[in-house]
Amino acid sequence: MNKTKWLIMSLVLSMVFFLAACGGNANNNTASPSASAPAASESAAPSEEASAEEELKAEDGASLIVWESKEHRAHMETIAKAFTEKYGVPVKIEEVGGGDQINKLINDGPAGVGADVVVFPHDNLGKAVAAGLLLPNDYFADVTKEENSEASVKAFTFKDELYGYPRSVETYALFYNKDLVPNPPKTFEEVIEFAKTFNDVGKKKYALMWEISNFYFAYSFLATPGGYVFGSNSSDPNDIGLNNDGAVAGAKVYQSLKEILPMQSGDATYDVKKGSFTSGNLAMDINGPWTIADYKTAGVNFGIAPLPSIDGKPNVSFSGVKGYAVSAFSKYPQAGRLFARFATTKETQLNDFKAIGTLPANKEAAADPAVTADPLLVGILEQFNNSYPMPAIPEMGNVWGPGQAAMADIWDKGTDPKAALDNAVKQIKEANTAVK
């Protein structure tokens, strides 16, 4: 076994142990008996799994609506086509971002126009369950627990009830064009020095770009120097650390980077970054495994490395688990269960990895040579080992809006970081109080 493959396999294993250690943090720090992988004697054997799928029948005349993000829609169409061929159930894919799906389902579900199956990051689970939006993963619970990493199962378990069908684990890292940056920078100080020789604002040529105000990415600037979302292992919504001294120090570093990326935060979209990176006008892009396939297809000679350190401290990114769930408002819940199961088997998760670069939650898929032999995963997995699972308590839903607004104000308006973060925390606390 060569050194690179050994390193990747070691990182895959450490990723599993990391998530296992931190998985409880995303669920009120409570170990959920139902989230633990069952003993071998209790787990569903392959023959039992096949029997379960044969016993569960889609409703007569069933059809499904599935929501999926723009970047993954084409691949989801492929999954839907295969599902229809197997079960005879038509599936329509509608484009809705993963982070927006639960908020949209709150209104569209009761109105009867929402999705039957949603695909979203685990931090939205508590909010979704509290609003009564999802059906438990009951019929396929045993096989889901058996096949997927314990942490990914815990991520989609709320108050001892499994709701989701895990698909992938993820965080973001530094994508770099090897033809422009042979050796990726290890610190933001190095990024700034490189930008002085590379940037050409008139030609929209930049050293580094990320989705500037998107709080999912911006969080790393606050967390690395010592900020945090909720205390007590993400379980205490009354303890918010997004405006402590560490967070403010990190926000100042974030604000200073406008010198090397002089553009409005809202202009740094996924599509803008993709176009700049593939054309050679962007040397480095902070992105996730979901974009690997796009950059491979574009023929870019790129590598992936951990995020640059901030003030000498290893960069702390958000990490999460994405998965499927069936809407409580679906007219065809049986068909919805079948689709969620079909879309999360080992085979489908491996196809996801090959097509769109997502890292499998399925244990066997994650250990497959197709995954462990990919050198691009080294940077993602190294960053993953220094990441922090997104909190999954309902109050997390109140963080994204104020967090994004604060970071946009700091960047676009030059607002004092302390004042902007104080205001964000005030809004989060008010929103938390309103839902109690």
Image (cartoon, rainbow, N blue to C red):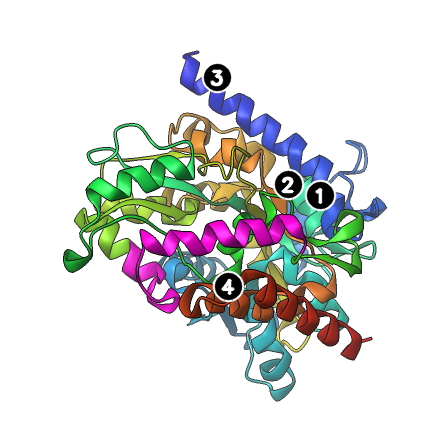
Sequence-wise first label, 3 or 2: 3
For the residue labelled by badge 2, is the local secondary structure a helix, a strand or a loop? Answer: loop
Q: Reply above or below: 266 against 361.
A: below
Q: Position of residue 220 (x, y in %)?
A: 54, 48
Q: Nearer the viewer, mark 3 or mark 4?
A: 4
Q: CA distance from mark 4 to mark 1?
A: 27 Å
| Left or right: 105 in relation to 368 | right
Q: CA distance from mark 3 to mark 2?
A: 22 Å
* Numbered range of the magenta stretch: 244-273
For the residue labelled by badge 1, is the local secondary structure a helix, a strand or a loop? Answer: helix
Which residue in the structure is indicated by mark 4?
407
Q: CA distance from mark 2 to mark 4?
A: 35 Å
Q: CA distance from mark 2 to mark 1?
A: 13 Å
Q: Position of residue 435 (x, y in %)?
A: 78, 77
Rendered-image quadrant of the N terminus: top left
Viewer-proximal residue, 270 or 219? Answer: 219
Which residue in the structure is indicated by mark 3?
6
Q: Amino acid at mark 1?
A: Gly
Q: Nearer the viewer, mark 3 or mark 2?
A: 3
Sequence-wise first label, 2 or 1: 1
Q: Amino acid at mark 2?
A: Asn
Q: Is residue 260 magenta?
A: yes
Q: Reply above or below: 75 against 193.
A: below
Q: Reply above or below: 134 against 192.
A: below
| Left or right: 368 in relation to 16 | left
